[in-house]
Image (tube, grey):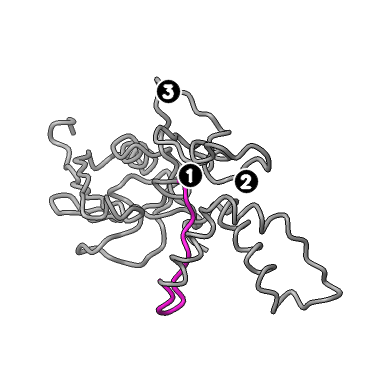
Amino acid sequence: ESAAEEPRVLCIIQDTTNSKTVNERVTLNLPASTPLKRLFEDVASKVGYVNGTFDLVWGNGDNVTDTTPIDQNSDKTILDAGFEPGKKNFLHLTDKDGEQPHIMPEESGTTDDSAQDRLIGPLPREGSVGCTNDYVSQSYSYSSVLSKSETGYVGLVNQAMTCYLNSLLQTLFMTPEFRNALYKWEFEESEEDPVTSIPYQLQRLFVLLQTSKKRAI
C-alpha cells in the first residue's frame, strides 16, 4: 500500500501541566504506521518539551480506557496501540513521575545554573544594599533539570481553605531578610519537640520550597 493511500490518524493533544496551555490543543495528523516512539518525538517537537520528560494518556475522546500512560518505549504502531483512523484521538500531556516536563533549551542562549541560587537562594549576610537584584531577575532562565513550573517556583498545596496562610508563607519565603534569619536559627532537640516547634517546621518548609523539584509541596 502506498503512503498516499495509508490511513491517517488525527491526534489532538492537550497540555494539562500548565494553566496557560490547558485550553490550547496541538494537532498531529500521522500515518497509521507511525511508531509510538515517533509520536512522542513529534509531540515533544511541537510543544517544545524535552522528549522523555512527559507522559501521554488518553483524553476525553471515544477511546478512553484508563489513565495509564502510553508506553513510549513500545515498538507498536499507533494503530496497534488503539488509535483509530478517521476519528479524533484525544490525548492529555501530563507530568512524568510528579515532575513538570523539561522545557527545550534555546539553542542561541546559554543556561546559567547559578541563576537558580540568585533567584531564591539565601542572600549574603553582609552588604545587603541593592539586594533586590540578587534574587529577582527579569531575564532569568532556569535549567531544564530544575524546572518546577513555568516560573521555577514551588507552590503550596491548599489544605482546605488555607489559601490565606499559603500566601503569607510564600510572602515570608520571598523576603530575604526573614528567610536568612530563619536559616541562621538552630534547633535544640533536647529543649523542644520538632513536631510542635513552629520555627523548626517553618525552616523545614522553606528548605523544601527552595530545593524541591515538585510543582507543589
* Secondary structure under the numbered disc 1 in the rendered image: loop
Quadrant where the N terminus sits is top left
- The kind of residue on which mark 1 rests is Ser
Q: Which mark is residue 109?
A: 3
| Cβ atoms at labels 2 and 1 below 8 Å apart | no
The answer to whether residue 215 is above or below residue 189 is: above
User: In 3D space, how far apart are the residues under numbered discs 2 and 1 (Cα atoms)?
Assistant: 19 Å
- The kind of residue on which mark 2 rests is Pro
Q: For residue 167, what is the image quadrant?
A: bottom left
* Secondary structure under the numbered disc 3 in the rendered image: loop
What residue appears at the point 70 percent right and 68 percent down from the top-left corner?
Answer: 200
Q: Which residue in the structure is indicated by mark 1?
A: 147
User: In 3D space, how far apart are the residues under numbered discs 3 and 1 (Cα atoms)?
Assistant: 16 Å
Callout 3: 10 Å neighbours few (<14), some, many (20+)? few
Nearer to us of marks 3 and 2 is 2
Nearer to us of marks 2 and 1 is 2
Q: Which segment is the magenta one?
A: 152-163
Q: Main SS type for the magenta part?
A: loop
What residue appears at the point 13 percent right and 50 percent down from the top-left corner?
Answer: 86
Q: Is residue 154 magenta?
A: yes
Q: Position of residue 83 (x, y in %)?
A: 26, 53
Q: Which residue in the structure is indicated by mark 2?
A: 122
- The kind of residue on which mark 3 rests is Gly
User: In 3D space, how far apart are the residues under numbered discs 3 and 2 (Cα atoms)?
Assistant: 26 Å
